[in-house]
Amino acid sequence: MQQEKIPTIISGAGLGGLSLYHALIKNKDKKEFNVKIFERETSPTADRWQGYHIGLSYYGARSLLNCVSSSIASNLPKAIPNPIPDVETHGITITDQIGNVLLTLQLNHLKILRYVLLEGVPVQWNKKCIKYVETQEGVWYEKLPELQIVDYGITHISANVSVPQHLMDKANKIHENFLVRKTLGTKEDSTLMMTRLIPIKQEQNDEKSEPHYRVTLVYSYPFELDNVDVESDKVKVDDNDPASVIEHVKRLIRTLRPDCELTDLLIEFWDLIPKTIPNDPIKFPFKTYNPVQ
C-alpha cells in the first residue's frame, strides 16, 4: 500500500524555509511529504534588496549539509565570497566608546546562500500568509498565529545608508578594514556597523563625485534611556517618521557618548540616512556592487 504524502506548507522562502524544504525532500525515503512553499515577495530580486553576510559555526555548517542534497552541497562554495586582499578583513572588531580595540574575531561569511538554496525549489511567489485556522481535521495555514514577544527591555534601531569614501576612510582609521564594527558605551548602549569595502554600483547619471559604500547601522540601548535628559526633552519620537527617529538616535549618542572623533563620526553616519522612505525601490542605492575581482 502506497504511503499517503503528508501535506506540508512552508511560509517564507528565506534561509530557514528553504533549508526545511530541502531537509524534507532529502528524507523522503523515510516519509513522503507534499511540500508547498510560499513567499510574499514577487521574485528573489524584486521588491526590496535585502540580505547580508552571515557567519556559520562548525555545527551550523554540519546541520546545513545534513539538510541539503549532495548537488546543493557542491554549489555552496559559490556562496562564499573571497575577501579582497589587503582591502578588507572578514571579521568583527569591538571597541570602547572612544575607539580603543577590545576584541577582534575572524569570521567566515556566506553572501548568496539564498540563491544557492533556491535551486530546484518550486517557490510560489507573491503569496502572503494572511490567515491561520485550526480545526479538528487539521490546520489551514491562512493566518499568522499569535506571536509570543519577549520584552528584553532593549531598543534596536537599524538603517541602511550610502557612505562616501572620505567618511569610510575616517572609519577605517579607527576600525581598520574589518567588515563588522561594534562599539560599547558605558550606559549599556552599543553601535554596530556592517559593510563591504566594495563600492556601490552607481548609475551613469549619478552626480556623486566619489565612491560610496553600503553600510548597515544599528544603535541599541535600554528602554529606560528614553527618559534620559537630552537637548530637548520635549521632542517626541514618531516611529513612523524616519527623520524623528534619526534625530532621537543622534541626541542619545551626543548625550551618552564622550566628545571624541568616534562620537562625531557616528553622528555623521546617522545624519546620512534618508529622512524619507524612497518611493522607487529600483533606484534604492544599495542594489548591486561594482565587480572588483
Image (tube, rainbow, N blue to C red):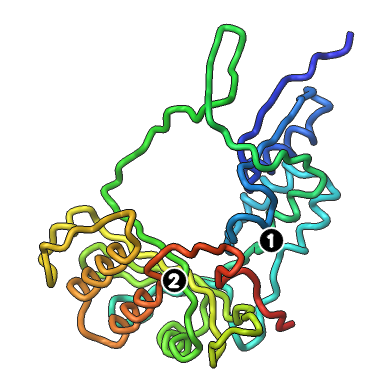
Q: Which of 240 and 6 is in front in this view?
A: 240
Q: Which mark is residue 112?
A: 1
Seen at 12% across and 72% down, the residue is 231
Residue closest to the far right = 1
Residue 28 placement: quadrant: top right
Please give left or right for residue 180 compared with residue 281 in the image: left
Read off the residue under disc 2. 193
Give the secondary structure at mark 1: loop
Q: Tag 1: Cα neighbours inside 10 Å, few (<14), some, or many (≥20)?
A: some
Please give left or right for residue 138 compared with residue 43 in the image: left
Residue 203 rendering spot, x and y as whole percentages: 64, 80
Rounded to the nearest whole Å, what is the CA distance between mark 2 and mark 1? 20 Å
Quarter of the figure that contains the C terminus: bottom right
Seen at 28% across and 76% down, the residue is 97
Please state which amino acid type lies under the numbered disc 1: Ile
Residue 43 rendering spot, x and y as whole percentages: 69, 50
Give the secondary structure at mark 2: strand
